[in-house]
Structure formats: C-alpha cells, structure tokens
Image (cartoon, helix red, strand yellow):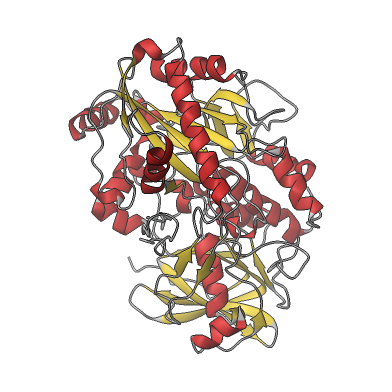
Amino acid sequence: MAKKPYSNEADYVIVGAGSAGCALAGRLAEAGKQVILIEAGGPDTSIMFKRPGMITMIHSEPKLKKKFDWGYYLSPQEHVNNRRLVATRGKVMGGSGSVNGMIYVRGNKENFDSWEAEGNKGWGYADVLKSYKRMEDWQGPDSELRGKGGPIKVLENPDICDAAKTFIEAGASALGVPVNPDYNGASQDGMHVIQENTSNAIRFSSSRGYLTEQELPTLEVQQRGTVSRVVIEGSRATGVEVIEEGGQRRIVKARTEVILAAGAFGSPQILMLSGIGPAEHLRGHGIDVVADLPVGDNLHDHLFMPMTFAMDNSPHHSSAFYFGKALLKDRFKPGSNFLAHSVFEAGAFLHTSLSQSTAPDMQLFAIPWSYPPFQDDPVRLSPDKRPSLSAFSTLIRPKSRGTVRLASADPLAAPIIDPKLLSEPDDLKVLLEGVEMIRAIMADSAIAKHVKEEYEPGPGYTGDKLRAEVIKRVSTVYHPVGSVRMGVDERAVVDPELKVRGIDGLRVADASIMPTIIGGNTNAPSMMIGDMAGAIVLGTGL
C-alpha cells in the first residue's frame, strides 16, 4: 500500500517533536487546530525507548547512537583541556526525552521568579506551577502543589536498592540535611529518592503522554525531514523548507504561525539559516540578514563530575552478560527488573559555600552502577564490572556562557557548539565542593561499612591534583539552554509570548528560551514550556 503523501499546509507548523514540541502540538491539536509537527528522526515505538532502563544501549551501541542521536560534539573547550565533549541530542520522536535518564525535576521556585523579575511576565513560579499541575499525573500522595490526571505519569521509584537507600541516609547524617519526601513540592533541599516520568515500566516522554495516548485527528506528524530554514516573506514567517531523506526539498506553509521547538542547538541554527541572528556572522556565511538579533548567545549547561565506589550492597554489574540476562527476563516478564525504572535512584539538592540564594547550587545523583570515567566518546566506554555505586557532583547554577554558531550555510552541517565550560572560575569551585560532599557521605557510618574502595577518581586525588582530575573528567549533563533567550531587552531573541522580535508569525518554544537554566534536570521544564506555549498561542490562559 502506497504511503499517503504528507500535507503541505496547516494552521500551525511546529518544528521538532521533542519534549516541548510534542507538548505544544498536543495542546494545539486537542483544541482542534490543524497542526503539522515535523521531526527529523523516526518513531519511538521500539522497546528501547519504551523500557526506561534500556537507554544504555542507545548511548553505548555505535549503530543505535548514529541512528537516534544527532552526533554533535562541542567545539574544543579551552578551560577543559581543549576536550571535544559529546553533546547528545535525541533524533527521534520525543527528542532527548526519549533517550534521557527520566529524572523528573521541575526546578526551584526562585528560578522562575527570577525570570519574571527580568520582565518575563507570566513566567513566575505561580504561573508555571499551573502548567506543571496540568501536565502531571503524580502517583504520590495528594498535594496542592502536585497534579493528578495529566498526560505525563510521574512516580517516585519504589524499587531503589540498598546502596541507594544508604546513600540517602548517609547524606542526611553527614551533611546535616533533611530527607525530602518531595523535592518537586514545597522545598527542593535535602536528600531524596528520584522521581521519574514512568508508569508500569513504560517511559512517559512527551511523545507518549501528549501524542500516543491521545486521539488527535487534526495533528499530522511528518518524520525524517530536516527543516533547513523558515520561509519569510517581508517580515512574516509563512512556512518552512524541509529536506527529505532523499534530498528533495519542499515547502510546508503555515496559515497562522511557525513555531520552532528544535532545542537549544537546532532552533538557533534554523533561525540563523533563515537570516535571523548576529548580522556580521550571517553575512560571513553569505546569508541575507532579515533580523539582527543575538541568536545563539547565552548558551549554558549543567556539568557533573562522576565518582565511583566499590560497594557490597549494590546489586548491579556493568557487563554485557548481566544486561543480557535482564533483557531475557524482561522479554518473558516485562517490567520485572531494573529495566522498569530510571538507572538513577537517589539524589540531593544542596548548598555549597558559594551559594548566594535560597536555591541550591549543587545537585547529587547516585546510580547503583559503575560509571565510565571519561565521557569524550561514549561509544568507547568501558565501565568497571564490579558491584558499584556512582555519585555525581553536579553544577546546577553555572556562570559560564557560550554560543551556538553556524559552521556553514549548509543546513545539514552540524553547528559550532561552544558553551565555554568552566570559563568562570566559580563553576569549578562548586564542582570541587560537590566532590568533597560525596566523600563525606561515603565516609559516614551509615554507609562506610559497605564502601570497599573509591576507585574513580581515587582517594589520592586531592588539592591541585583533584582540580586537574575534575577538568579531565567533567562532562555536560546534556541540558543545553538559553541560546534563544526570552526577555524584554536587547539580549532577548523572543519576548515573553515567545514571539521572535521583529518577525510576525514566528515563535520559539523549547529550552533555548530559558533566560537562565533551572536548578535541576531540564526535561520536565521543557515539557512545561511546550505546555505554556500552547496556552499562550491559544490565548486560553492557564
């Protein structure tokens, strides 16, 4: 049976079926709007995407990574030994939300109130809380701060192992912080069990929650097409140009609006290819300037430093044989083992000595696995196979800022991604304090008897030697934001209604619009941005 040809016109054309794009498309289609959603990747129907614990295969198997990832690398990072770190981005329905660790974090109240204080009316905590509550189906206790019945299932992992439990207990004891029953509730601070967007051993990405689980007759999803530019007539966006897999090009027209949701790398790249961006940079690539705006500036990301400890109460082994047995068991009894949940089990939000606000500046993660020590090329990783617990010192309020720029006018060429990691000295200081916090936790009596060895990086790394080792090992958390900044001043690309300045009929709705990164994992906030964008576009309010 011949494939039905794609449509070439709709009320709204949305570019990017990631965490924000799917949420936005779902909201508009639910309201009866004719929507075309364009995704460069393919479907997320494979068990690899459905089963939460199978992300390791996608990240470590070269053929899978090539198929489902954009294959980006950062430019050589001057302050990180000129390393070219991997910049993983999902190229599949659900975007990076289909290949991530599913740690569900809303962000700190202060994060959103600071956005509003900068002039972004409608983006304060009270506003985004309404969106979070609408999109959640929280499986935990009833709370006026949590949502029930929304499209995204969220639960606290009920099956964490003994190593993770003792990590939480020891953290509270060693650092003098509480065990927090809901870090997405009234307070973010303290040790906690990870919350994840899963249900019945199924990943609830925005693709599943907003699209697969809904009946949306006015939505058309077009896959395996790369958007090369926004079509602009005069000062109005009227559609997009799409490059199909075979190289053919076609125009998809938007009767009402074009909305970019291609992420912190994709959205600025498409804008610049369309003549919207820093004028001198565009002219250098032979691109006519339509609007001279600071597109690609303000790029920033979270960073982490991994540490691994040999533990006698950790159940897992980082070996192909162990993983293969789990796959076999899951085949006959789905959801019966660790594949049913996120690999991340325990965590914390903490304050270092550099913290200057009520919001934490340090996040810890713990996983009952050995974590590979070097992240420059994940397809060549070789983690230790002993029972282990890995903990991560994570910088969540980075000061360093960088850029996204075009490498050429070729829309199929990867952009130049330069977040200028650790260019601000305080960022490294925070990471170092996090390492010492982890060591204090692992020395506490609640967990010390189970710790056999710190073998990554090792107890011999202190002082300047530790500083050098952090620079050698630090990795991004794959949370890029800010490159199409929302605001009301000359630094902004979009206004608080997400409209691109000076261009009618064009908005951006994804993590790129964040003025500053939120405190914690960015997947839930990206879905929230898509959900908020739907309310803004429809004019329905929250």
Is residue 220 visible from the viewing direction of this image? no
Q: Quadrant of residue 145?
A: top right
Q: Is residue 78 above or below residue 289?
A: above
Say above or below: 443 vs 113: above
- Rendered location of residue 24, percent (x, y): 62, 55
Count the marks: how many? 0
Q: Is residue 177 visible?
A: yes
Residue at x 52% of width, y 34% of height: 433
Q: Position of residue 536 (x, y in %)?
A: 75, 57
Name the residue rendered at 36%, 47% in the picture. 472
Q: Is residue 503 left or right of residue 316?
A: right
Q: Where 301 falls versus 195 (above or below)? A: below
Quarter of the image for residue 481 reads bottom right
Near-viewer residue (485 or 237): 485
Seen at 62% across and 18% down, the residue is 178
Q: Is residue 1 left or right of residue 127?
A: left
Q: Nearer the viewer, residue 361 or 367?
A: 361
> x and y percent of residue 507 in the render?
67, 67
Front residue (pair 198, 412): 412
Is the residue 130 above or below the residue 34 in the image? above
Residue 217 at x, y = what percent?
57, 57
**In the rendered image, which quarter contains the N terminus?**
bottom left
The image quadrant of residue 25 is bottom right
| Identity of the residue furthest to the left in this view | 321
